Amino acid sequence: MLSPLCRSFMLIMVLLVGTALPTLAQVTRCPPVCTREQGLQNQINESANRFRPTLESLTIDGGAQMTTTSSVTIEIRASRATHMKISERSDFQGAAWQPLQTRFQFPLSTTLGEKTIYVILANEMGEGFSRVIGAPGPTSAVARRVIEYWNPRINAVEVFTSDGSQRIASSPSREVLIRLDLLGSATQFRVAPAAEDLSRLPWRSDFNGRDFELWLAPEVGIQVFRVEARNGVAGGSNRVEFAVNYVGSRVFFVGGWDAFREARSQGWSSSLQGCQPEALANNPSENVPGEPSSAGYEGLSLARHGGGCDGHLFRGRSLAPGWTLETDLGTFTASGQTGFVPASRPGSNQIEMRIACPQPPGGNVRPENRFDPDGCHVVRLVLRGPANAPWRDAFKR
């Protein structure tokens, strides 16, 4: 038998069901034997579930994975909802119930990185009950979405030759150009070997918002770095690691005939009129200072038997990335003749050479004699490239 006090309380609860319903658990059916209190509770639960809101969809910035702005656009699709709470905390501490909006701006907290946004909905059932439980009425399940907040964000890091002309994975030079693929913009950066604490370094402004120069350590091998960027004094990017294989460099002395034959085997074309290329033997004792004393190579002879020679050697071609043509071309030309003229300044990867060896005024050219005063020869090409590579790699592109 229920006491008078219990009967009064149950009557008040029944009257409240028609005006305001609390957030209640899912309906649980009565066991075979049901008390009056259990039956009444089930009726209250069933009534609440009929009014419980449903969150049908929740998107942040149209479903974006990342943002560079401190405010994002929230879009909500719901049924039977009149109020909402939104927070970056799963317990909604500090968040207040507010009228439902289907599209609105939400300010993110200032820290960078991954953000989780939580949303819960409610259906207003009356004023009286909200004073008791702090909610307008039955509530939905909690939904959450994740978005990354960076200002800016580094998508990728690329390594180029120092002049920015070639993308590389290995560098024969200690000086390289680093290019940041950014979402958003940046005015400052900092970079350091991955083993160092990047936070201890000052921010640098000596780049154009995308590129900056980097000097590698003198030790040959793979070097790993970490970089980050920021926009002025605010925000900051994610930190990204990248690697550069420093292979070092050295000078290669390549016989003119060997270079010509290798370039021809790679399909390089030359424009040669009146030229009859052939090998020209060299005496190792005639090597220039700085070359190995045992270096023997064959030069390239072009003018023969009184005929002139005109055109371009290796026309329109350039060396493979990481290779350059050095200052000394090692040419030997007839006295007073133009001979060979490089098409670009020393240190360039352009290897094209202009040839101008007119017909000698008298006599025949004897190419077997390197010092023939009427000869026109390329004794050697002086190349610079990766220290651990064969010189033939210079002609492979």
Image (cartoon, rainbow, N blue to C red):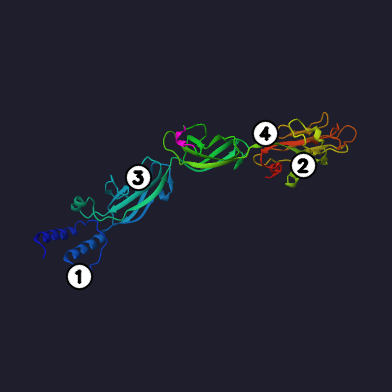
Range of magenta residues: 196-201
Relative to 6, does residue 173 appear above or below in the rendering?
Answer: above
Towards the viewer: 227 or 108: 227
**In this rendering, the label closer to the viewer, 2 or 4:** 2
Q: Name the residue that disc number 4 marks.
A: 347
Which mark is first along the chain, 4 or 2?
Answer: 2
Q: Amino acid at mark 4?
A: Gly
Which mark is first along the chain, 1 or 4?
Answer: 1
Q: Disc number at residue 106?
A: 3
Q: Residues within 10 Å of mark 2 (few under 14, many from 20)?
A: some
Q: Which residue lies at the image location 73% right of the left edge and 34% below the top edge?
A: 342
Which mark is first along the chain, 2 or 1?
Answer: 1
Q: How far separated are the C-alphas under marks 2 and 4?
A: 21 Å
Q: Name the residue that disc number 2 marks.
A: 258
**In this rendering, the label closer to the viewer, 1 or 3:** 1
Q: Residues within 10 Å of mark 4 (few under 14, many from 20)?
A: few
Relative to 72, does residue 215 appear above or below in the rendering?
Answer: above
